[in-house]
Every structure is written in structure tokens, then in C-alpha cells.
Amino acid sequence: MEILKLAYKKHKVWINICKSFGLNKEDSEDIVMNMYIKLDQLTKKGTDISYNKDDINHYYIFKILYTSFLQLKKKENKYRIVKVDSDDQFVSKNNDVEFAMMEQKFNKEFSKLHWYDQRVFEIISSGKKISELSRETNITYISLYNTYTRVKKLLKKKLGL
């Protein structure tokens, strides 16, 4: 428990370190609280992170804070939060018209492609794995992959995507 008391004496320092990572005050508080929990777990295991009876290892604390920060960022990047205020964002006649025009343009450009390119693109786009298609048709994986990616890039370019 002595380590926690020593760590708490520098609570504002730990908060400022977390803020230097670009966090707001609330997230900084959360990370510092997690650091206290981690320190408590370590001291219960017998780990001594003090320099002497009056001070603790600041680098060790920094590493705990930075690791917690990285874990938080990893979680944030994993999930995308989408806020929806009203249903109008989903139903729009303009969107339907734009989609229909884009579909028409796609079909026009797609019909200009060689039949082989069309068929490979359709099969792989439907969810078939390239490796499965390669085994079934005895066409090399790289040939199918190159055909698919070339068609996809061409269509994106033609559609302005």
C-alpha cells in the first residue's frame, strides 16, 4: 500500500503525462486509475518498483501509462461509432437516383469488358475465394488475382471512385 501512497502524491503529474499523449481529462483520469490498479496488483505479487522508501520508479509508471494509452487507442480504432440523429439520413430520393445512375454507369462499363474478365470478377465478387476458383478451374491463382484486381481498379477509375 505504501507504493500507492507514493504514487498518489504525484497524481497531477500522471494526469499531465496522459494529457501529453493527447487525451482529455476524463480519459487521463481513467488511465491513471488503471495505473493505480496495476500498481496494486504488482505490489501484491511482490514486485518492488521503488527507488528507495521515499520515491518510486517514474519510468516504470510512465511505461504503464503509455501502454494503457496504446491499448485505449487500439480499442478506439477497432470500433467505429456512428451517430444517427434521424431516419432522413437513410432514406433519400436523391440517394436512390444517384445509386441508380451509378449502377447504370457500372453496367455500361462492365459490359465493355472481355467475357473472361467479367466472369472472373462476378465469381470472386460473389464471395468465392480465389484459391477455390483456382483449384476448380486449374487457372493459376496469380492470374485470377491479377484479373480481379485489374478489373476492380478499372471500374473504380471509370466510375470516379
Image (tube, rainbow, N blue to C red):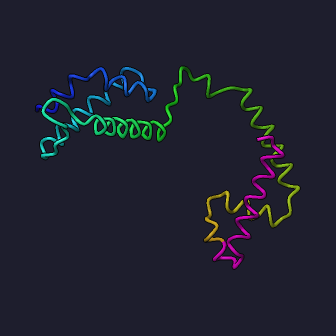
Give the main secondary structure, helix, strand or loop, of the magenta stretch. Answer: helix
- Vertically, is 8 above or below 116? above
What's drawn in magenta, residue-wise?
A: 134-161
> In the image, 73: left or right of 5?
right
Q: Residue at x 25, y 37 (%)?
A: 57
Quarter occupied by the N terminus: top left
In magenta segment, residue 148: yes
Quadrant of the image for the C terminus?
A: top right
Q: Residue furthest bottom?
A: 138
* Nearer to me, 3 or 127: 3
Q: Position of residue 54 (x, y in %)?
A: 15, 29
Dividing the picture into quadrants, the one containing residue 150 is bottom right
Q: Would residue 104 be found to the left or right of residue 54 on screen?
A: right
Q: Is residue 33 above or below residue 154?
A: above
In the figure, residue 130 lies in which quadrant?
Answer: bottom right
What residue do we see at 36% from left, 21% from top?
A: 26
Front residue of 134 and 51: 51
Residue lying at the far right of the rendered structure: 112
Image position, residue 7 (x, y; %): 21, 28
Residue shown at the point (77%, 31%) measured from the top left: 97
- The image shows residue 15, relative to residue 72, as above or below, that is above
15 falls in the magenta region: no
Front residue of 108/154: it is: 154
Kindly identify the residue that appears in the image at 72 percent across and 68 percent down.
144
Residue 36 % position (x, y): 22, 32
